[in-house]
Image (cartoon, grey):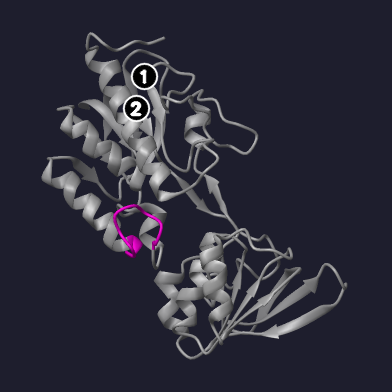
Amino acid sequence: MENQELVVVGAGVAGLAAGIYGARSMLKLVILEEKLAGGNTADAPVIENYPGFLSISGRELTQKMIGQCKSLGVKINELEKVVDIDLKDATKIVTTDKETYETQAVIIASGTHYQELGVPGEREFSGKGVSYCGVCDGPLFRNKRVLVVGGGNSAAITALYVAGLASDVKLAHRRKNLRAEQTLVAALESKKNVEILWNSEVREFTGAETVSKALLFNNKTGQETDLEIDGVFIQVGEKPKSQLARKAGVDTDDEGFVVVDMRQRTNILGVFAAGDITNHPVKQVGTAVGQGITAAIEAYGFIRQPYYYSRG
């Protein structure tokens, strides 16, 4: 069993920010990540709203944060999945598929996973033309016909990215207006090979070995259309990876997001949460970083009990 002062679950931008500030506070800590460090941010083709960078890819930004963590001596254990969290006692137990950790405090920053549409053919063609990551799979559709599904920033950014690769891009959104930032909407409208399909819902994906058609339903006219495609990028939101936290007694809201106060504290003493897994209404890189910083500073106060720290 390995002893730590602080265990951070998740190496997305919130967890990495917590690692940086925890290390600067001289805490003995480890960051546990079931996949590769960087989280969903690493999949972003471009980020244009993070202060200090006019434009930077998600991969480059997260690599900078990972490098900063490592320069401070932070252990980032990749490909190590947390399988159980015991928060009943003052000493918390975090169990992974490789090790068991005793710790005084835990920061839950396990983030979210991509939400599925839940339509026929989606899972059947996942990895066979259906994708949830533009930067990962976009190059596979060079000079091909692509459908992007969604209406927020992620959908708009993905459509803009694949528009530079694909010959034809359709963006299907179930409403008449996009939720994306207006700068992104303007950029989409300026692309000659991008068409926005308003009031359009995907009903089914079909094909042989790979996806080749999407059945679209116009919820205003009632018309159904078979759209011929070579690939699909689904960008309809994300769901929190909070199952283990809930099982351990951490309060979540109706959608499964971890409930925190302004100091990132959960309902359990010594347990904090940060990033997209929380019930904070704004899911952005900047807010996730800020939450990670706050959680680390609060965890330091909880562990070391400096004279100014208050549990109230």
Q: In the rendered view, does 250 fall on the left or right side of 89? A: right
Judge by depth and name the residue closer to the eye, 158 or 241. Answer: 158
Q: In the rendered view, does 273 fall on the left or right side of 233? A: left
Task: Name the residue at 23% across, 8% down.
Answer: 307
Q: Looking at the picture, does residue 141 appear above or below residue 90? A: below
Q: Are marks 1 and 2 in contact (CB under 8 Å)?
A: yes
Instruction: Tell me which segment is drawn in magenta.
Output: 47-58
Q: In the rendered view, does 26 fall on the left or right side of 292? A: left
Name the quadrant of the N terminus.
top left
Report the number of discs.
2
Expressed as whole percent of the image width and height from the top left, the position of residue 130 reads 55, 72
Task: Name the residue at 29% across, 12% down.
Answer: 309
Task: Name the residue at 82% across, 78% down.
Answer: 224
User: Mark 2 belongs to which amino acid?
Assistant: Val
Expressed as whole percent of the image width and height from the top left, the position of residue 98 reads 28, 41
Judge by depth and name the residue closer to the eye, 297 or 87. Answer: 297
Name the chief secondary structure element in magenta: loop
The quadrant holding residue 49 is: bottom left
Instruction: Report helix, strand or loop for mark 1.
Output: loop
Q: Looking at the picture, does residue 27 appear above or below residue 122? A: above
Tell me if residue 51 is in the magenta stretch.
Answer: yes
Q: How much space separates mark 1 and mark 2, taking CA atoms?
A: 7 Å
Residue topped by disc 2: 106
The quadrant holding residue 25 is: top left
Instruction: Report helix, strand or loop for mark 2.
Output: strand
Tell me if mark 1 has few (under 14), some (14-19) or many (20+) residues whose alpha carbon lies within 10 angstroms of its own. Answer: many
Asked if residue 97 shows in the view, the reply is no
Task: Name the residue at 55% across, 71% down.
Answer: 186
Residue topped by disc 1: 270
Tell me if residue 147 is in the magenta stretch.
Answer: no
User: Mark 1 belongs to which amino acid?
Assistant: Gly
